[in-house]
């Protein structure tokens, strides 16, 4: 099974989770780069507004062709209970060639379920599995077991037969 972990990260938390998933499962990885400046407090505010308005953004060309993968694992931080514009753009651009999906997110405390529903609707696919990682999970180390369970769920799915 050929799988690709695709994520966007503004602060590095989602990158960390994506890298762990990729390393633990031995799957390829692709970081989505948003060309819009989103650093600092003003960048934080503008980012939340863009997510709320369901805006698309300009992303750098991807290095990995999602069409050659059987499974795309999409990761996003939660901004105002929504996916980031970078992940929205990626899904919009590639949804017709993505075969199967799974989702993961990093969040302050809530918004994952609503975001996963929105991602599933946008890509017109039901995720094989989902994973929510909160700041609390990272602080107390619970994220490690959650990641292992997520990978096991994915590898036990029939697409891996």
Image (cartoon, rainbow, N blue to C red):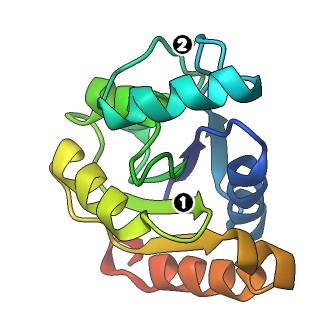
In terms of depth relative to the viewer, which is nearer, 128 or 69? Answer: 128
Q: Residue under circle 2?
A: 61
State the image quarter where residue 17 is shown. Answer: bottom right
Q: Is residue 144 above or below residue 12?
A: below
Looking at the rendered structure, the secondary structure element under dot 1 is strand
Would residue 10 appear left or right of 96 to someone viewing this image?
right
In terms of depth relative to the viewer, which is nearer, 7 or 105? Answer: 105
The residue that appears at 38% across and 53% down in the rendered structure is: 70
Nearer the viewer's eye, disc 2 or disc 1?
Answer: 1
> Few, some or many C-alpha atoms within 10 Å of disc 1 (few <14, some 14-19, many ≥20)?
many
Q: Position of residue 46 (x, y in %)?
A: 53, 23
Q: Is residue 85 above or below residue 25?
A: above
The residue that appears at 25% across and 36% down in the rendered structure is: 95
Looking at the rendered structure, the secondary structure element under dot 2 is loop
> Few, some or many C-alpha atoms within 10 Å of disc 2 (few <14, some 14-19, many ≥20)?
few
The quadrant the C terminus occupies is bottom left
> Disc 2 vs disc 1: Cβ atoms closer than 8 Å?
no
Q: CA distance from mark 2 to mark 1?
A: 22 Å
Would residue 47 appear left or right of 20 to someone viewing this image?
left
Q: Position of residue 155 (x, y in %)?
A: 50, 79
State the image quarter where residue 56 is shown. Answer: top left
Q: Position of residue 110 (x, y in %)?
A: 48, 69
The residue that appears at 47% across and 76% down in the rendered structure is: 154
In terms of depth relative to the viewer, which is nearer, 94 or 27? Answer: 94
The residue that appears at 64% across and 84% down in the rendered structure is: 146
Q: Residue under circle 1?
A: 105
> Which label sits on residue 29?
none
- Tell me which label, 2 or 1, sits earlier in the chain: 2
């Amino acid at each position: 099974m050929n799988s690709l972990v695709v994520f966007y990260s503004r602060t590095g938390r989602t990158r960390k989770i994506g890298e762990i998933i990729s390393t633990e499962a031995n799957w390829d990885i692709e970081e989505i780069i948003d060309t819009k400046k989103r650093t600092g407090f003003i960048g934080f505010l503008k980012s939340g507004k863009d997510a709320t308005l369901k805006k698309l953004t300009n992303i750098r060309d991807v290095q990995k062709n999602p069409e050659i993968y059987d499974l795309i694992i999409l990761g996003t931080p939660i901004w105002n209970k929504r996916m980031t514009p970078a992940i929205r753009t990626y899904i919009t651009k590639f949804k017709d060639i993505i075969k199967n999906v799974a989702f993961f997110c990093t969040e302050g405390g809530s918004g994952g379920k609503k975001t996963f529903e929105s991602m599933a609707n946008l890509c017109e696919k039901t995720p094989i599995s989902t994973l929510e990682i909160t700041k609390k999970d990272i602080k107390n180390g619970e994220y490690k077991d959650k990641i292992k369970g997520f990978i096991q769920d994915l590898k036990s799915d029939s697409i891996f037969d």
